Amino acid sequence: MLNSNSPGVARSVAASQPSPARFLALIAEKLAASEDLFLEQLASDVPFIEKASEYLFSSGGKRLRPAMLLLSSRLLEHDSDEEVTYSAVIELIHSATLIHDDIIDHASLRRGRTTVNELWGNSLTVLLGDWLYTTAMKMALSHDNLEVIRRLCDATLRMTEGELLAQQKLGSSNISADEYFHITRRKTAFLFSAACSIPSLMRPARLEADELLQRYGMALGTCFQLVDDLLDFTATEGELGKPVLSDLKEGKLTLPLILLLPRLQPDRRRLIEMVLKDGDFRRVDRREILELVTSEGTLDEVAEMAEKLAAKAKEQLASFRVCDAREAMEFAPDFVLQRRS
Amino acid sequence: MLNSNSPGVARSVAASQPSPARFLALIAEKLAASEDLFLEQLASDVPFIEKASEYLFSSGGKRLRPAMLLLSSRLLEHDSDEEVTYSAVIELIHSATLIHDDIIDHASLRRGRTTVNELWGNSLTVLLGDWLYTTAMKMALSHDNLEVIRRLCDATLRMTEGELLAQQKLGSSNISADEYFHITRRKTAFLFSAACSIPSLMRPARLEADELLQRYGMALGTCFQLVDDLLDFTATEGELGKPVLSDLKEGKLTLPLILLLPRLQPDRRRLIEMVLKDGDFRRVDRREILELVTSEGTLDEVAEMAEKLAAKAKEQLASFRVCDAREAMEFAPDFVLQRRS
């Protein structure tokens, strides 16, 4: 795809169309080593830690952030244990965030599986999250690279702030698209940005690559969140493990609704506000809301924004050498756009 | 006191008896700088963070851990911004632990003041704790000393593990003195140990001092917890901001009761188990329990253990040069023994 102007490469690319499986193969070995590493780190003489983290990590998960870190590392021609460690660290931080978020959301299910807080209660789960965050930092320290630790701390702070801001907007219909993007960058995009750019901080540091990879990660992460928002309208319960419009029911206003609200007459606006207030669909039919976002076209608008972000992510890669890792990173935004779960 | 065999020094020491005020004066300036520093770090564009942390830190607190770090730093003749940073970091980590502990304990009051979770709810408080932990790490990074960050991570992990182990023993009467000390070392003593030993990791590193100061901190921290346990029996509500035997009511078995239980006849044992189970004193009179620990002498035994730990802490200082900081650190265990709140 990348080198379609070169006939030789074009042929070989045609023979192997971009697919998640093909790109995962590039980093499969390191991704497996990273899984082994974090399972090893979760060994503990505190029986609960061992039991709960085994449960947590047996659930699988997409491992998208560690995969991006490993691809970016391959792009920069690193090949050592260091990127394996950081990819495990990124997944640990992500997991810690999820289990604290599940406490906050009083979630009993995540991707169709009982949450840690539902199984063991909030007290142990708060502590498990703390332990995972700190274990992640401790692991990251093992390569003596302070810049990487700083980047990880920054991403963690921004995520926590994003979640705090989101919490304070919960149940409110008063949120602008600007505020939404501000929160999304912190809550979701910064960790993607850290994952994609950390390899540029590995020795020898590549400062010119750092900025591009940070921007790549920010665009990819924001795109990821927009697709998440869209899936709340378009995915089936089978795909997502939760019914349509679950975000709205939980008091979270997604971008299609944020764009929709100022265009609605007060009586239509009231429908959305009622669901936010009630936390259920007893007074409003889900189909009414779906009808509104479809007829007003805000679903399509958000899909278009997500596509633009995907394109913006890809653009950041233009100056990197052409290689399998770059091709995979150019495919990643499409993968994010196409995901159904 | 230290040099009573030297008449000149003996006179000057007699003129200035050890007192908390006298020793605090040694580090007052740095302690104030450390307060300024962490208030500065808590500035945030997230309004809740600013509001909640202002509330949290206006409550005062003993600042015992940062004070110990600064004294130990003075003992090792450091005089820079670095120890000021670490003393702020230690207090931030301690605060993050307390606010997560208050969620876990469903505490509505701490030292007579409404807790953050009671004021703003668990969700925001979980996130505030995460933010404080990460801010602490970020601050600590500013002096490029990886060994210090490792020590801080280790202490935080041990604390979290200690709290997890304690949580799992909650409401249980089945806990041995060995288990108690194992939990106490992790939950309380490791952070004291980190506070006291971090100055030995500052450049130039002092490895021989490190081990002694770690041991000093472990003994002091364990002593601190034993005194805490004793205060649950002996302090008035005015001193502690909570009624006598609050720990027991919350399902926490303190050392005087752990030592007492195996010596009791089943019917007396039942009294303690009833309070643990009920979480209140409706079926048992507090005076009955107080009578048991007094008549069996376990309060005195624990007081004796605390004194031995205080002596052990002091012994670790024997090889350090005689100076005001050493004198203050030799007094600190006595201060801990004498505290009433």
Image (cartoon, coloured by chain):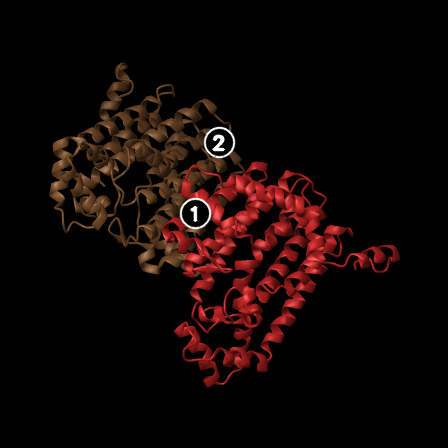
Chain colours: A red, B brown
Viewer can see residue B304: yes
Q: What residue type is labelled 2?
A: Met
Which residue lies under the disc numbered 1?
Answer: A128
Q: In which quarter of the image is the N terminus of chain A?
A: bottom right
Q: Along the line of sight, which residue is nearer the eye, B34 or A130?
A: A130
Q: On the picture, is B318 further left or further right than A137? A: left
Q: Position of residue B51 (x, y in %)?
A: 38, 58
Which residue lies under the disc numbered 2?
Answer: B202
Helix, strand or loop for disc 1:
helix
The residue positioned 63% from the left and 60% from the top of the image is A220
Crowd class of label 1 (few under 14; some 14 to 19; many from 20; radius 10 Å) = many
Q: Position of residue B187 (x, y in %)?
A: 35, 39
Q: On the picture, is A140 further left or further right than B46? A: right
Q: Which quadrant holds residue B52?
A: bottom left
Vertical order, A249 against A51 (above or below): below
Which label lies toward us, 2 or 1? Answer: 1
Q: In which quarter of the image is the C terminus of chain A?
A: bottom right
Q: Position of residue A62 (x, y in %)?
A: 59, 55
The residue positioned 48% from the left and 69% from the top of the image is A246
Viewer can see residue B51: no
Vertical order, A282 against A97 (above or below): below
> Residue B21 shows which numbered tag?
none
The residue positioned 34% from the left and 56% from the top of the image is B117
**Is there one chain holding both mark 2 and mark 1?**
no
Helix, strand or loop for disc 2:
loop
